[in-house]
Image: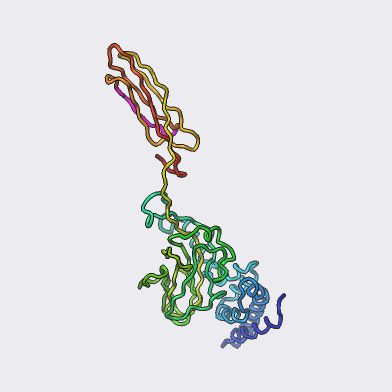
Amino acid sequence: MKNPYLFAACLAMALPTLSISTDADAAGNDQRGLRGQLVHRIVMKWGNHVQEAYRADVREWASDMVPLFSKASIDTLKRAANSPTFELMNDAFLVDDQGTTADINLLNAINSGTLAGPIKSRLLGETTNDLVFVPITPCRIIDTRLAGGQIAAGTVRSFDVTAVGNYSFQGGDASNCGGAGSAGSFAAAAINFTVVFPVGGPGHITAFPLLTTQPTAASLNFSGGDVRGNFGIFRLDQGASSNELSVFTTHTTHLVGDLVGYFINPVLGTLDCVETVSSANSIAANGTGSATTPACAAGYTIVSGGCSMDLSQGQIVTSRLFPGSGTQFCFFRNRDASLSSNGVAYGRCCKLPSGRAP
């Protein structure tokens, strides 16, 4: 049940900050009044959810949200107040000037081709480097505004990315993000990171595998007070630790992380293959003839084939594979002047990954 007294206390914390302004005209006063009304709606609408879903102190949540409430535009506050879900309310504060979230901008870039070429998965190869990409619907796995609080300047915080049934313990979605959390220990993750109102700057964050040396490269650069996002692909630790990814920040900041895909190690195995053989075709002395293998069974693709004759005077004139029909064709000439010869065609049919040609 909602506690109106507790929410009133939260609003008392938030609203004085929102009234700071040097505008003295009536329009400015109207804007401040509207801002207060919108903040009131947001806190009253979602404070109870924050308590129940994330076991968070609603007063701390309201206090952490004050910079968002005070710096957000009226249009942003309206979108947040009218959002039908808590996730969409949060996303309302992570938008560009056109009101588009970083995740949508990323998907638009992929779909339009402005992002570097499409990522193609590979089945077989060197298992530590040739990885298989699994895209997912963007899903939040980290939000320090809801769990953990700001990351202090000059410190590193580690996060759990793989083998997670519910990401809400670190502020993320209360699910396994479309199966990502149940995919086992994967090697790398595609994450869109957003810093929310860092204290001071310019600065940066650096994301890197747990238990490795922190690199000097920056994953996201920011200025003080920014709400800024950047997409990256990050290698993860695949050891025994429950956490796999560490994030360093030069300045105190909140951090949001949205998972858009992950890379798994390929599984090497033997191909399932069978042979298909034509019936023997008797070719008369000084004659010609042909043979064609039966088509591969459903689910199998012909990958190789050959031809043979049982006389040394036999000649294989044509040997051709027809992947479309799943057959091997052979044309023979028997050069023996007195004996007939048998010609046979054979093919090798294998189950291949979807879309792979022989």
Up/down of 338 relative to 357, above or below: above
Q: How many marks?
A: 0
Does the magenta-highlighted stretch encompass residue 319?
yes
User: Colour scheme used in the picture?
Assistant: rainbow
Up/down of 130 relative to 287, above or below: below
What secondary structure is the stretch in magenta mostly built from?
A: strand
Work out which residue is located at the far front of the displayed protein and give it: 240
Does the magenta-highlighted stretch encompass residue 239?
no
Instruction: Specify the segment rendered in magenta.
Output: 315-324
What is the quadrant of residue 313 in the picture? top left
Quarter of the figure that contains the N terminus? bottom right
Residue 353 seen: yes
Tell me if 185 is positioned left or right of 10 in this view. left
Q: Residue 188's spot in the image, x, y percent?
A: 43, 61
Which residue: 31% across, 19% down? 333
Q: Residue 92's spot in the image, x, y percent?
A: 58, 70
Quarter of the figure that contains the C terminus? top left
Tell me if 21 is positioned left or right of 1 in this view. left
Q: Give the camera-side residue of 66 and 131.
A: 131
Which residue: 31% across, 17% down? 334
Q: Residue 216's spot in the image, x, y percent?
A: 35, 73
Which residue: 37% across, 35% down? 304
Q: Residue 351's spot in the image, x, y percent?
A: 45, 40
What is the quadrant of residue 133 in the picture? bottom left
What is the quadrant of residue 265 in the picture? bottom left
Q: Give the camera-side residue of 35 and 261.
A: 261
Residue 108 seen: no
